[in-house]
Amino acid sequence: MSTPDPEVYERGRGMDAHNSVMREVRSRNDASYDPREPTRVWLDEDNTPGGVKRSLTIILNTGGCRWARAGGCTMCGYVAESVEGGSVAHEDLLAQVEACLDHEREHADDPADLIKIYTSGSFLDEREIPVETRDAIGETFADRDRIVVESLPDFVDREKIRSFTDRGLDCDVAVGLETATDRVRRDCVNKYFEFADFEAACAEAVAVDSDADAAAGVKAYLLLKPPFLTESEAVEDMQRSVRRCAAVEGCHTVSMNPTNVQRHTMVEELYHDGGYRPPWLWSVCEVLEATADADAIVVSDPVGHGSDRGPHNCGDCDDRVQRAIKDFDLRQDPSVFDQVSCDCERTWEAVVERETSYGMPLAR
């Protein structure tokens, strides 16, 4: 497999140039974080292969993504929220998990069926989450139905997944693929691996599923409108990517994330210079409706919807469109989009038809 090394391209060009810019941008961050406090935790509902389940989402505060330390993805600012020093002790990570369980006990009548654990990096990277911590988390949630853990494809290994499936816990590995188009992933997102690596990660999950007590699979995370794409190019890339992911054995869910402008990123630099607009919510609807017949659960959760830094329309219809997207996530029924309309949809159509340069958005 590819390795997360900034020396991927010729020195000073391509990926190395991206990394150099992003290291400089992130060096301006001077925030610090408590290693015993999770980054975020919340309760929700999610569509899974086993049906709609109540979920507890945990974002653990770790030493951060290994690739982000080298420079990382153009749109991702999560490493700026990580603990300094590159690692968090086993005891501190378990203290974060306990804080999340306290949150659940306080805000829910019953334990959630689905646990989702993200690290803003790779849960299966043992430099972020030690083996003993992974096993302890598997034991902690062994009485739940399903767990989702986040990882780059390099670290997806059937033996690591067994920390959960051997305890009877269905496990999905959430892989930040971003796009099925290698050139877009490389040049727009600045991610080092190829689609073939994603396919290999799916094969590892399938290998577990063949002889385990519980199921294993992959949830592909895609990115709608990374920098350097027009609105129409972004929509077309997502439609192709959803279908290509759904065709891979072991990939049962595709989650399309519209880009939002996070702090300490290249996207934020472009945004402030007038060279980037987050995607329209109409574009999210377009992709979901067009791929509703794909052989996978296809969902989207637009973060920061309706704000200038998040996916948005005109401001008047944003909440209505967001509710339709959430409804589609749970029911997989494209007819929900027939129930929302707004005059700004004509503006979006004009943008899709006429926008020819990523650096000059036709509408803000």
Image: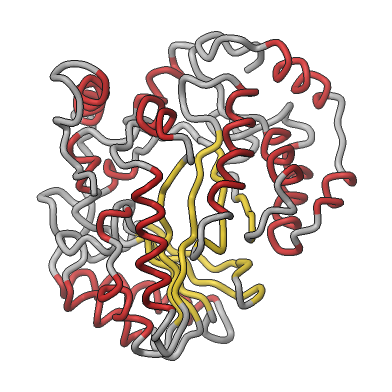
Q: Position of residue 217 (x, y in %)?
A: 46, 69
Residue at 26% across, 20% down = 14
282 vs 352, nearest the viewer: 352
Vertical order, 327 against 260 (above or below): below
Residue 332 position, x and y percent, is: 75, 59
Instruction: Tell whether 215 sits left or right of 31.
Output: right
User: Which of 268/241 is in front?
Assistant: 241
Q: Camera-side residue: 220 or 99? A: 220
Q: Quadrant of residue 141?
A: bottom left
Q: Please report the residue visible at 73 percent of the width from the left and 41 percent of the height from the top.
A: 285
Residue 268 position in % (x across, y down): 41, 25
Q: Is residue 142 left or right of residue 357?
A: left
**Extreme residue in the left direction:** 85
Residue nearest the viewer, comparing 190 with 28 = 190
Q: Quadrant of residue 272?
A: top left
Residue 29, given in percent of the width and then of the height, sits at 23, 33
Answer with left or right where residue 322 lies relative to residue 267. right
Quarter of the C terminus within the rendering: top right
Relative to 185, does residue 216 appear above or below in the rendering?
Answer: below
